[in-house]
Each structure stands twice: as structure tokens, then as C-alpha cells.
Image (cartoon, grey):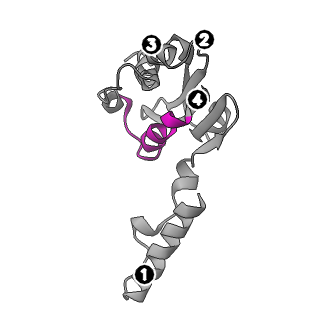
Amino acid sequence: MGKYQARICGDVIAARAKGLPGDGPAHRDTANDRGAPQVIFTDPQVCAVGRTEAQARADGFAVRAVEYDLGAVIGAKLQAEGYTGWAKLVVDEDRRVLLGATFVGPAVVDLLHSATIAVTSEVPLDELWHAVPVFPTTSEIWLSLLLEYGL
């Protein structure tokens, strides 16, 4: 997060040094508004981006949460014998975009950047459906979660 904020600050300074306004879309810190990624490097790993279900409801969103057992994903089963984990998406039902995502399990941090892109870019679920997960990997959780949602 510090690197992100330093990049924004540097862009503003550089724009102003060139005599430009420095207040365009690239010069605003928006990660906090939509959710910066967070990781707890424990065993298993815990990572999240965006709002939790409770935060989204408190912020007034019409929310639907979708959960799925990561251990049931073929790619996760191939990663490690007895793989266990959990995934959860928080969906804004009015706009059908992700407000947040949480993953718990071995090596789930590798799922976080795709979730961060989906949350911060507000990718519609109908578009996210066409992002084909690599087979056989844990990233297949995306397909499982979207199927669980009803796509």
C-alpha cells in the first residue's frame, strides 16, 4: 500500500513540476475506497480485498455473499493431498459487481491479484464469467464461485 501511495504522490509531484494540474484520475488514491488487498501470511494463508459482507451491508449495498469450499476444486486437490480452504465473494446485487473477496487456504495469495482487479475495476459478473481459469489450478475457484452465484 505504501508503494501504491508513493506512486500516486510521485505522479502528482511530476505533473505539478510540468505545470499540469495533478488532479486527474491517475492522481487520486482510490484503493482505500474500493479496498486494498490484505494478506496474513499464516498457515493457511488468509487474504482479502474490498469490503466484507458486514461492511458492504453497513455501507448500504444490496449484498449477496457466495461461498465455496476450495478443497472441492480439482486444481486445489492436485496442489496438495488433503487441501482444505474456503473462498467467499461479496456481490453488489444492484450492479452485479464484486465488492469484496476473501480466500483462506494454502497459497491462496496467488488468487488475490485477480480479485483485486475485479473489485477495483468493478468488472461485471457477466464479463468476469468469460475470464477462463487455468486448468488444473486453484484459480478454478473463480468458475466454481460464479457457478454458485448462478451464472
Closer to the chain start, of discs 4 and 3, is: 3
Residue type at the position of mark 4: Phe
Mark-to-mark CA distance, 2 and 3: 12 Å
Residue 58, position in %: x, y?
67, 38
Residue ID at (57%, 25%) = 88
Q: Which residue is mark 1?
A: 14
Residue ID at (47%, 37%) = 115
20 and 5: which one is in front?
Answer: 5
Residue type at the position of mark 3: Ile
Mark-to-mark CA distance, 4 and 1: 37 Å
Looking at the rendering, the stretch of residues picked out in magenta corresponds to 109-125
Mark-to-mark CA distance, 2 and 4: 17 Å
Q: Secondary structure at mark 2?
A: loop
Q: Which mark is residue 74?
A: 3
Q: Decide: is 146 above or below 40.
A: above
Closer to the chain start, of discs 4 and 1, is: 1
106 and 89: which one is in front?
Answer: 106
Residue ID at (32%, 30%) = 131
Q: Which mark is residue 82?
A: 2
Q: How many marks?
A: 4
